[in-house]
Amino acid sequence: MANIVVVGTQWGDEGKGRVIDSLARTSDAVVRFQGGSNAGHTVVVNGEKFVFHLIPSGALYPGKKCIIGNGVVVDPQDLLLEIEALRSKQIELKDLYLSSNAHVVMSYHKRIEQIEEERRGEQRIGTTRRGIGPAYADKAARRGVRVADLLEKGVLAEKLRINLSFWKNFYGLDYSAEDLLHQYLEYGRKLKRYVTDTSLLVNRLMQEGKNMLFEGAQGTLLDVDHGTYPFVTSSNVVAGGACTGVGIGPTKIGKVLGVAKAYVTRVGQGPFPTEIQGKIGEILKEGGQEYGATTGRPRRCGWFDGVILRYAARVNGLDELILTKLDVLDLLDKIKICVAYKYRGKLIQDFPFELEYWERCQPVYEEMKGWKKDTSRIKIEKDLPKRMREYIKRIEEIGGLPISHLSLNPERSEFLSLH
Ligand code: IMP
C-alpha cells in the first residue's frame, strides 16, 4: 500500500514505533514530518531495545531510506549521538537524508524553554525540555537557523548575531557567538553528507511508485492547532502535517492510519478527563511500563476515551485504527470506556475546544466486565476472549472506524490482524 501516514490519536506514546517498525518492512522509505527529539519511539527486537528520537524507525531495516523532513526541528547534537548509538549496534545509516530546510534546535533554545517553564510556575506545560517550542517559535518569527545554514559560515554567523542579540535583550542570555559558530559549523560538517532537498527526493520516489511511510510523532491532542492548547507541543501532529512537513501534496496520501492505546496515557501537564488515580492507575502504569521514552517521567493513566477517538478520526481523516497494549487490561475485573462528557449537566458528544470544558467536564462511562485472562501470547483473532472482542467492537462503534490490527505484546513480531 503506497503512501501511508501513521498518527497517534491520543496524547502520544500510543505505540506508533512498533506500528511503524512493522509497516516499514513493506515500505521503501520512512519519513518523519514534525517534532524533534521530544519524540521517543521504542522498538524491541530479539529482546534488545532501540529508542529512536529523531531518526525514523525504519533504520532497523537495511536498504530502507530514512528521511527527516523540513517540518522536523533537529538538534544536531542529539542526531549525531543517535547515529553513533545505532552504529555501535552495527546499524549503518547509509540511506539517511536530512532536509536542508529543517530548523535547528540550538543550545540556547533549551535554556529559553527552561526559563519560560519556570516563569509559568503552576501553569507550566511540562515539556520534554528539548528546546522544541523555542525552536518552532524562532521558525515562525522568521529568524530560525536551518540545517542548510550550518553549511554556510557567513550565513550562520549573521543569524547567530541576530538571534543572540534578540535573546540577550529579551532574557538576558549571554552566549558567545564565536563558540556557537564553531560548534554548529562542526555539526554541519559532520551532518553534511546527509543533507539534501528531501521534498524533491520524496516526490521523486513517489513518482517511481515507491511505498512511502510517513511517521507521526506525539499524538493528535498535542497538536498545536487541534490539541489541548496550550498544553500541547509546538508542531502540527495531525495527518495534514505530513504534507507541509515534507513538501508533498495532499492528493499523494493513500491512507491515514491511527494508533490508539487500549487505555489512555499522558505525560506533562494539562487536562485529562478520563485520568484514573489510585490502584487501577498503578496497574496500568506498571503493566504497560508507562514511563516516558525520552524523559523517563511516569505517564498519567486513564480509561479509553471514545470522545477523543471520534475527534482524532475527524481531524486526521482516519481510515482505520490499530489498537495497542490490550493485554495490559488482562488483570482488570471491570473496564470502563468513556462515550461522552458531561459539562454543567449537559451531554457533550463532540470533543470541546476550550480549556474550561476539558478541565471541568465529567466523563460518561460504559462499564464492561474484564476478560481476566493472559492474552499476551494470542496470535489469531479466534483465540481472543469473547469479552475482549466485545471491547474491541465497542471501540469500533464509538469511533466509527474499523480496527485493523491489535498488539498484545511488546515484541516486534507480534501483531494480530483482525477481520
Ligand atoms: P514539548 O514537545 O517538549 O514542547 O512538550 C510539550 C508537551 O508535549 C508536554 O506535555 C510533553 O510531555 C508532550 N510531549 C512531547 N513529545 C511527546 C511524546 O513523544 N510523547 C508524549 N508526550 C510528548
Image (cartoon, rainbow, N blue to C red):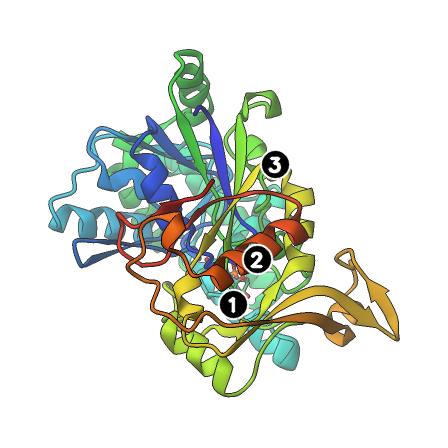
Mark 1, mark 3: which one is toward the viewer? 1
Q: Which residue is mark 3?
A: 240
Q: Nearer the viewer, residue 208 or 54?
A: 208
| Secondary structure category for the residue under label 3 | loop
Name the residue: 39% across, 12% down: 208
| Secondary structure category for the residue under label 1 | strand
Of labels 1 and 2, earlier in sequence is 2
Q: Tell me the quarter of the picture where residue 46 sits.
A: bottom left
Residue 288 image position (x, y, % from top left): 39, 69
| Secondary structure category for the residue under label 2 | loop
Cα separation, mark 2 vs mark 3, equals: 16 Å
Query: Would residue 155 be found to the left or right of residue 343 on screen?
Result: left
Residue 125 image position (x, y, % from top left): 59, 69
Q: Ligand 1 within 8 A of label 3's CB?
A: no
Q: Disc number at residue 10?
A: 2
Of labels 1 and 3, earlier in sequence is 3
Residue 333 image position (x, y, % from top left): 49, 79
